[in-house]
Image (cartoon, coloured by chain):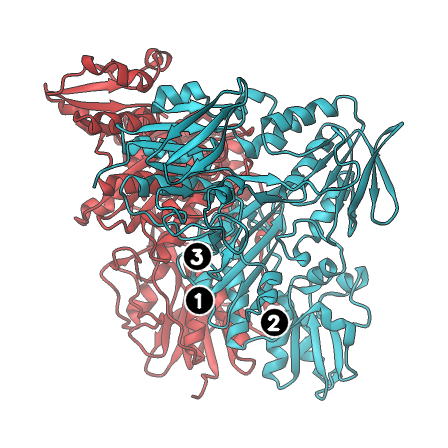
Chain colours: A red, B cyan
Amino acid sequence: MEQPKRIVIVGGVAGGASAAVRARRLSEGADIVLFERGPHVSFANCGLPYHIGGVIPERARLLVQTPQSLMARFNLDVRVNSEVQSIDPGARTVTVRNLKTGQVREQPYDALVLSPGAEPIRPPLPGIGDPRILSLRNLDDMDRILAAMAGATRALVVGAGYIGLEMAEAFRERGLEVVLVEKLDQVMAVADADMVAPLHGELRAHGVDLRLGLSVEGFEPGPEGLTAKLSDGSQVVCGLAVLAIGVRPETALARAAGLALGSTGGILVDEYMRTSDPAIWAVGDAVEVKDTVLDGPALIPLAGPANRQGRIAADNILGRKSVYKGTQGTAICKVFGLAFAITGQSEKVLKRKGVAHHKIYIHPADHATYYPGAQPLTLKLLFDGEGHILGAQAVGAAGVDKRIDVIATAMRGGLTVHDLEDAELCYAPPYGSAKDPVNMAGFVASNVLRGDTALWEPEELEALRPDQVLLDVRTLQEFQAGTIPGAALAPVDELRDRLDELDPAKEHLVFCQVGLRGYLASRILSQLGYKVRNLSGGYKRYRMSVGGA
Amino acid sequence: MEQPKRIVIVGGVAGGASAAVRARRLSEGADIVLFERGPHVSFANCGLPYHIGGVIPERARLLVQTPQSLMARFNLDVRVNSEVQSIDPGARTVTVRNLKTGQVREQPYDALVLSPGAEPIRPPLPGIGDPRILSLRNLDDMDRILAAMAGATRALVVGAGYIGLEMAEAFRERGLEVVLVEKLDQVMAVADADMVAPLHGELRAHGVDLRLGLSVEGFEPGPEGLTAKLSDGSQVVCGLAVLAIGVRPETALARAAGLALGSTGGILVDEYMRTSDPAIWAVGDAVEVKDTVLDGPALIPLAGPANRQGRIAADNILGRKSVYKGTQGTAICKVFGLAFAITGQSEKVLKRKGVAHHKIYIHPADHATYYPGAQPLTLKLLFDGEGHILGAQAVGAAGVDKRIDVIATAMRGGLTVHDLEDAELCYAPPYGSAKDPVNMAGFVASNVLRGDTALWEPEELEALRPDQVLLDVRTLQEFQAGTIPGAALAPVDELRDRLDELDPAKEHLVFCQVGLRGYLASRILSQLGYKVRNLSGGYKRYRMSVGGA
């Protein structure tokens, strides 16, 4: 098979850069031209908030490659400040405008790779044109934010997704007051609401003025600074505002060239990352992917998948059949001292799509509690009736990434919750437990599937029936420190001796702190013929469900 | 199916304790009696070295359960200081001796679980009876070591496996001089020698007098303390010595009862953890397991598997078919600031058993290098010609446990090295890289299998042929700071311009620091028709192979 001689790549970050260097590794003979609209290629876009926050002091560290270094090492013809304005699929050429000189030229290709990325959404609000209203996508944006911070004492961040949260933290690191406005009742829209309560607490504990359930309705320049009007009628006066309410795939170029788009609005590609035009491939945040759990179309803008897609496009261009298997949605975000991570589908998406599922919560420590420094984490596991894992989320100060990575890998391997029971993971007291959180999640999920325990959910408290009783099976001290209103105390260690106090006609809704003692109580009672269910995730889950951490 | 009424368990730690509490969760009606020879049950045996070292200051934290707490919560009849002296499989009784009172009684059982553990090996050396020569298995041993430390200024540790290394660290934490003697030329016998060089450096950097390739030939009480005679004729004078040269399964009881032993000397069990006697199960360090990689018999004393086996034995006793799928050998050890972890088989075992395999080494950082605190780690991956993962080892200051856990899970899921390329793992700069070390390992391994790169090994330096040339493709600075003797410099970024300096008749053995630039150089040269191989793991691997860190 003859290899394409001229490979043209549009977009020099993540997916585009990966495609270019992979193409070179496969073909010393190809002419590879990389066009990038901005002045930089292959920069560390995930590092931008950390330079703003001062955690990465040297700006130069963000420049992973330069046009010169790519030329030297990979013999790539890298053209920065070069905007591809149109594609002629028939002639197989692109029209490129040099943004410095204004010069326009045509560039022929045998194979074209589009990696335009996704652009921050900028809604048409009154006053949106104020130069103090910024977004964060590239180094220029970062420099603008740094410049705007100079005289500012307060920053407004609109949107509490990954970038919004990282920016709120960055501004606090720099000593600014921060107002974080989020339209939803929770931060991190990809997460289930019940898993992010600890993030709300962490943000507020670090001085972020978090305002949930509000949106910005307009901006106005005022005498004391930029004034944002919120949907509840309040105002925020700030020195700068960062919009981080999401991104949309950049598809203008693809659309104009007649390439097919998917139902999500992203560029449609097949499993080889090829578009509807056989000479054009597309990768990264601009393309529609298949999610690996539900097999449906999705937009999942993440750095890892973008890199892999670039590599895969280059493989296929150069005659190697290489398949992109879809995106699982594994992601993590640092929020001050906590991490939140997710893989697969959330409960809310499963509900929205009508996918039958079970869920369990556990609150283990990241390593053996008798070894210093153990930190609590909360892990939520979603699975179907056969035990297939549909998704997982975790939040905590340590060990969150490890558990989500292990579960993500188990999902890729088609393992079930029963296999998580058996997972053989590293154990020494500084690193884990003989029964790792992943094993514990497997135990609890398997108990549900085997019918060993029936669970109840905090929402049921809204409509308790007269034939239901709430039973706190923790200790007196724990009970006195706070319990669910209406609960009676019956410590699990006394339960066998106090059976005469129970009414066999009633359903006993037991709970403990994290779910383990409640499970033991439920095993005792159910074996003795009592009707019993255990609060999923225990009192800690109840606290999270009412907004406590 | 009728459930056994009387369940008797011998051994109250890990496997035995797990079996007991699992049995109770499944059966409120069973009589469960747990005999433990020592004074404690269910203690944190993995925590013992850390209490000796002072990292876990409170001794009470090691007592996870007490006989009283197990009675209260699980209604278990726990008998400590109770040694089971014999089993009568015909009568289904055990004879138990109370070590405090001397009283002997018979206890009938319907189902018996043996969890006797493994005992530290104590070779019959001259002077071995000295009370200052100790082992570490339980709390009594720990207390004896703590007492012996009181007047001591120097400790001798014999054997550099998990316990030996943890004890060496513990003694250093307490300010003692430490001599660590190991018969092999490396610490951590389960590891491949080429992966533990950093541990040797770490031990010495923390003041441990590490003496490899030596054994202790005898002890003698001397005027200045206990004197150990080493195989090289030297002597070590110390206040106490800890023997940590390995353990052997405790099988005396099982043998006397006529139970079958396996070829490894452990108690033979089937996949349900049942021994050759249908009413007797066995779990934990005393049993022979199947290793999950080669499917062969093995002794793998680890806490996680022991716990799972106990649970599985209880399941099967109480009528639930539950299968133990074998032991993978996932383990980790902290050595001062480093961690070493392993899963699956080592290269030396694969070689010994004649299993064809490939191997690759990578030296990535645990997270994005532009984010502060990134630490280097070394990862070795072993795989077969179809890409099935046979084992992995890693060493480094951070992120070691996570990568080995992910690979261990991939192995359980039957994933290949190609799947590691695709693994979608948590990425944000504080936690990982867009191309995680696991992905990188997958890339390098897949490159080998696809024939994209040919590797050379440091051992080949011992017999270089005249038609081979060594080519250092790093920078001048790196070259000047140290290279492989005889290497010429040809930085990868200049390679395309300096092809006329290369002799097409020769084989070019290229290398860089960690293997990546060497790979790029090998791609350039091989595509242009040159004979070329890349040093597996780069100069860093070479340094490790000659004992450097």
Residue A417 pos. (x, y %): 32, 47
Residue A13 pos. (x, y %): 48, 61
Marks 3 and 1: CB-CB under 8 Å? Answer: no
SS under mark 2:
helix
Which residue is labeled 2 in the image?
A: B520
The answer to whether any part of residue B345 appears in the image is yes
Q: Are marks 3 and 2 on the same chain?
A: yes
SS under mark 1:
helix
From the viewer's perspective, tell me whether residue B100 is left or right of residue B515. left
SS under mark 3:
helix
Which residue is labeled 3 in the image?
A: B410
Toward which corner of the image does residue A503 lie, by quadrant? top left
Q: Nearer the viewer, residue A17 or A155?
A: A17
Residue type at mark 1 is: Gly
- A90 to B474, vertically: above or below: below
Toward which corner of the image does residue B515 lie, by quadrant? bottom right
Q: Mark 2 lies on which chain?
A: B
C-alpha distance separating marks 2 and 1: 17 Å
Which residue is labeled 1 in the image?
A: A310
How packed is label 3: few (under 14 Cα within 10 Å), some, or many (20 or more)? many
